Image: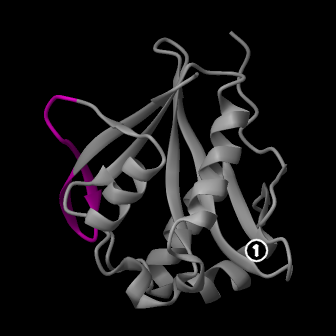
Amino acid sequence: MTEPDRQPTLTGERVILRPSTPDDWDALFAVASDPLIWEVHPAHDRWQESVFRAYFDAGIASGGALTIFDKATGAVIGSSRFDNWKPETDQIEIGWTYLKRDYWGGSYNREIKRLMLDHIHRFVATAVFTVGEGNIRSRKAMEKIGGVLRSGPPEMRFMAGEMKSHVIYEISRP
C-alpha cells in the first residue's frame, strides 16, 4: 500500500491548505489564542501559549499538519491535520482542526473537509474523526459533512491535564 500524501496543497473556492511550517507559528497562534475557540473542546486550555506550542510542535512533527488560508485575503484562518495512518485497517485520521471564529458556521469547514476527504480518499478507504464526546459544536459539524458515528465505547485521550472521552466518526470513500 502506498503511503498517503499527508501534506498536499489543496485549493478550493474559499480556502487554500498547504503544508504547515515552523514559520506559521505567529499567524496560527494569533488565531488559536482566542479562548472562545476552545471553550467546548476537551483541550479547553489550548489558547494558552505553552499548551498551543506543544500542539503546534506535535503537528509539525506529525508530517501531516496543514495551514489554512482565506483564498480572498491570504490571511491564515486556522489549521487541520492528517495523522494516525493505519495501513492495516486502510484508514487515516483527519482532525486537530480549528478555525478563526469569523469563519465558523459551516461553509468554510465543509469546504476544508471536502478538499481533505477528496484528496485522502485517493489513498485510503476511510477517514476517521475523533471528537470530544461533549463537544456538541464539532459533533454537529461532523454530522453536517456526512460523518457516521461509530458504535462502541468512547476512546480516551489525555487533554488539558486529564483523560477525556471521545467519540469516533467516519467517512468512507464514495
Image position of 149 with respect to 14: above or below: above
Residue 76 image position (x, y, % from top left): 74, 78
Q: Is residue 11 left or right of residue 88?
A: right
The one of 61 and 117 positioned closer to us in this rendering: 117
Image position of 5 with respect to 90: above or below: below
Give the residues drawn in magenta, as a range: 151-165
Residue 50 image position (x, y, % from top left): 47, 82
Quarter of image, res 17: bottom right
Amino acid type shown at disc 1: Asp
The one of 147 and 135 positioned closer to us in this rendering: 147
Q: In this view, does 56 lie to the left or right of 3?
A: left
41 falls in the magenta region: no
Dot 1 corresponds to which residue? 24
Q: Residues within 10 Å of mark 1 (few under 14, many from 20)?
A: some
Residue 33 image position (x, y, % from top left): 52, 88
Residue 134 image position (x, y, % from top left): 19, 62
| Mark 1 secondary-structure assignment | helix
- Mainly helix, strand or loop, the magenta region? strand
Quarter of image, res 58: bottom right
Q: How many marks?
A: 1
Q: Is residue 66 visible?
A: yes
Q: At 18% from the left edge and 57% from the top edge, which residue is drawn? A: 163
Q: At 37% from the left edge and 48% from the top edge, which residue is drawn? A: 143
